[in-house]
Amino acid sequence: MQCSFNALIRKLEHIHPLTSEEMDALKKSCVRTVRFSANRDLVRQGEQPEDCHILLDGFVYRYTVFEDGRRQILSFHVPGDIYDTLHFLLPEADHNIATLTPGTVALVSHQAIIELTEQFPRIARALWKETLIEAAMFREWIASLGRRSAYGRIAHLICEMYVRVNAVGLARNFTIEWPITQSVMGDSQGLSTVHVNRTVQELRAAGLIQTQQKKLVITDWKGLQSAAEFDPAYLRLRLDSITAGEHKTNGSRPSVNARNGLAMGHMQGQRCSDQDRTTLFPD
């Protein structure tokens, strides 16, 4: 099978390293890889999937849809994630999983998972730990939606995505691919597209981030962490690579109050143009 498991290997090095024999067994259990286009459902609510998915490249997300058509995004997933191990033990899907970008998925049948976990108990523990970390992420999202401001929610999402992408080697100089549009971000954070746009402008005005087409640059990592009240411990990842390359804006960084004042002044002084709406996390 000619495909790269680098992201999975790097992630497991963080959370539960496998031996070369265990890693080879996991790779060989993949019956096939499938390339998907963007905005395609991989699992639909009510289905009974027969395979577990390993995301090799691209981004996917979980979501549910209400009767009136409103969508709530439940989580985002990055390369290296095994994002549907729950369907191995809970056969019927209670939510949907879709691609955010084009991506490649390796499929491991549920029968192969049974054989793997019986033969290699450490693989079983790795899969178990993956689900426990995912549960911790869900708890953090609940806390965000319940108690953080829009400013804090979006800052926290950016911090979380950066740490996860960086852990699998897909960040460079505090720059990551950012395929999350304003409407997608709104559906994940319980905010309108207009509210998302205004909040992103505040983060930019505070000197915390910049956006370049579908790339996001964190210009002040410590400041963004402070704005989000972000503690990455729940992700169970080694963070030395982040702190070693701490990013700061040119000159002294304004205080939180000064940044908030700058952002509010920016919002009161001008309304975002149509061009702004399409260039800040464009749809």
Image (cartoon, helix red, strand yellow):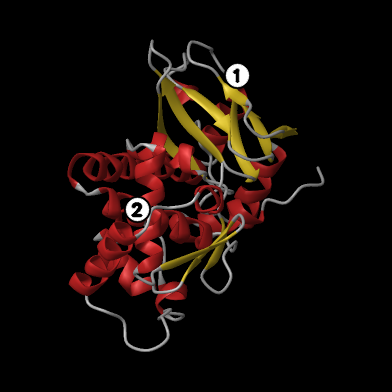
**Image quadrant containing the N terminus:** top right
**Which amino acid type corresponds to the residue marked 1 in the rendered image?**
Glu
User: Residue 9: x percent and y percent?
Assistant: 60, 55
User: Residue 155: x percent and y percent?
Assistant: 34, 57
Residue for point 60% across, 25% down: 42
Between 85 and 151, the one lying in front of the other is 151
Residue for point 42% across, 17% down: 94
**Which amino acid type corresponds to the residue marked 2 in the rendered image?**
Thr
Relative placement, left or right, of 179 versus 162 is: right
Relative placement, left or right, of 57 versus 76 is: right
Relative placement, left or right, of 121 versus 57 is: left
Badge 2 or badge 1: first in the primary sequence: 1
For mark 1, what is the residue? 50
Front disc: 2 or 1: 2
Residue for point 47% across, 37% down: 183
User: Residue 93: x percent and y percent?
Assistant: 47, 17
Relative placement, left or right, of 51 versus 148 is: right
Residue for point 44% across, 81% down: 244
Q: Would you call the spot at circle 1 few (<14 residues within 10 Å), some (14-19), or many (20 or more)?
A: some
Q: Is residue 194 above or below residue 156?
A: above
**Image quadrant containing the C terminus:** top right
For mark 2, what is the residue? 199
Between 162 and 195, the one lying in front of the other is 195
Name the residue furthest bottom.
251
